[in-house]
Amino acid sequence: MPFGQPVGYLINWLHSRLFSFSHTIFVNRTSTFVAMTDISEASAPEFARSYVKLHSCERSPLTFLQYSFLSFYRGPYVKIQVNSGNHEYTVSKTLLCRESAYFSAMFENEFKEGQEQKATLDKVEGVVSAQSFEALLQWLYLGRVKFELMVPEDQISAAIELARFADMCQITGLESEMARYIEEILIANPEPEPFTGRHVDINTYCLEPRHIISATLLPGGHSVRQTLAKASVGGYLRDENNKFKQETEQYPTFGSEVLQEVRKTLNGLKVSQYEATVNDPLSGRRIKLNSPFV
């Protein structure tokens, strides 16, 4: 600050300095907000890549919002390799151990992982993969998941895989989120209409036997399992040779869950002179029984 100047000059000089400082902070905040917005709207793989870049900020000056974002999850960190080191992630130990009893037991003890603060997760088909870990990472940091997939069948597979991985890691909160995600996919992708009416299995067009089989490995009562059972009710009630007849017979837990949903659905049965209808448990629409058409 210059000395030997009139008071008015000094006041104007201070005002200009404060304006310049506040303008700098505003610009930094704006640019960082855009970066954070991009991260929050990214897919799970994009978030994982962006998150790694944010960690590199520890070696360089941080902007205001970058510091605010990272400070809550600052060290200590642990390193997790997926699939024998093909993918490595640096994660907040505090966040990971707080949300997961599985990782807490792994890193907060005298075992090798606890001493090295590093762990390797081998690939497990339908459970552990880079895709499921990146999705879990996004869920832990942002409370949301966005898969980088376009095919509905693949999206359902990814959701079931993430649900199973979260169950393995003893992380709660994802059950209803993945169930809702699958439900939205099934409703948004019904079987294309034939020339007359709709097919009996309208809700299961994107469901495949592999989805049913994989979901049976989730705990009983899991929201994802309930969603798949609800989706199967319409076909079960309206066609004895429905799409998943074989699965209901070969996987008793799935068959039992379908029957439970059928019983609930029949509680809303309405019979008239010309038809019998129920509310479809997945879409909420009225469907006719003993008819291949809606």
Image (cartoon, rainbow, N blue to C red):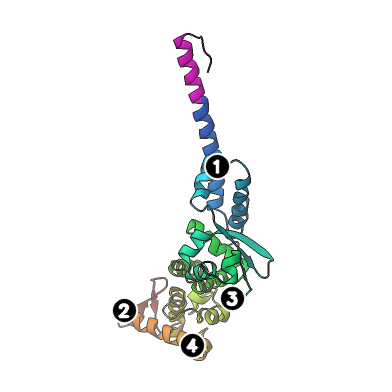
Callout 3–callout 4 Cβ contact below 8 Å: no
What is the three-letter code of the residue carrying label 4?
Thr
What is the three-letter code of the residue carrying label 3?
Gly
- Decide: few, some or many residues near mark 3? Use Cα within 10 Å; few <14, some 14-19, many ≥20: many
Tell me the mark number nearer the camera, choosing from 4 and 2.
4
Vertically, is 166 above or below 66?
below
* Residue 151 in sight: no
- Image coordinates of residue 3 in percent, x first then y, are 52, 13
* Residue 128 in sight: yes
- Image coordinates of residue 42 in percent, x first then y, are 57, 54
Callout 4–callout 2 Cβ contact below 8 Å: no
- The residue that disc 3 covers is 126
Residue furthest toward the bottom? 249
- The residue that disc 4 covers is 248
Q: Spatial distance from mark 3 to mark 1, Cα to Cα?
A: 37 Å
- The residue that disc 1 covers is 32
- Decide: few, some or many residues near mark 1? Use Cα within 10 Å; few <14, some 14-19, many ≥20: some
Dot placed on the residue nearer the N-terminal end, 2 or 1: 1
Q: Give the side of residue 20 with respect to residue 176, left or right.
A: right
Element marked by disc 1: helix
Tell me the mark number nearer the camera, choosing from 4 and 1.
1
Residue at 54 percent across and 64 percent down: it is 136
Callout 4–callout 1 Cβ contact below 8 Å: no
Element marked by disc 2: loop
Element marked by disc 4: helix
Q: Is residue 123 magenta?
A: no
Q: Spatial distance from mark 4 to mark 1, Cα to Cα?
A: 52 Å
Q: Give the side of residue 143 with respect to residue 78, left or right.
A: left
Q: Quarter holding the C terminus?
A: bottom left
Dot placed on the residue nearer the N-terminal end, 4 or 2: 4
Q: Write the start and end of the magenta stretch as one range.
A: 3-19
Label annotation for residue 268: 2
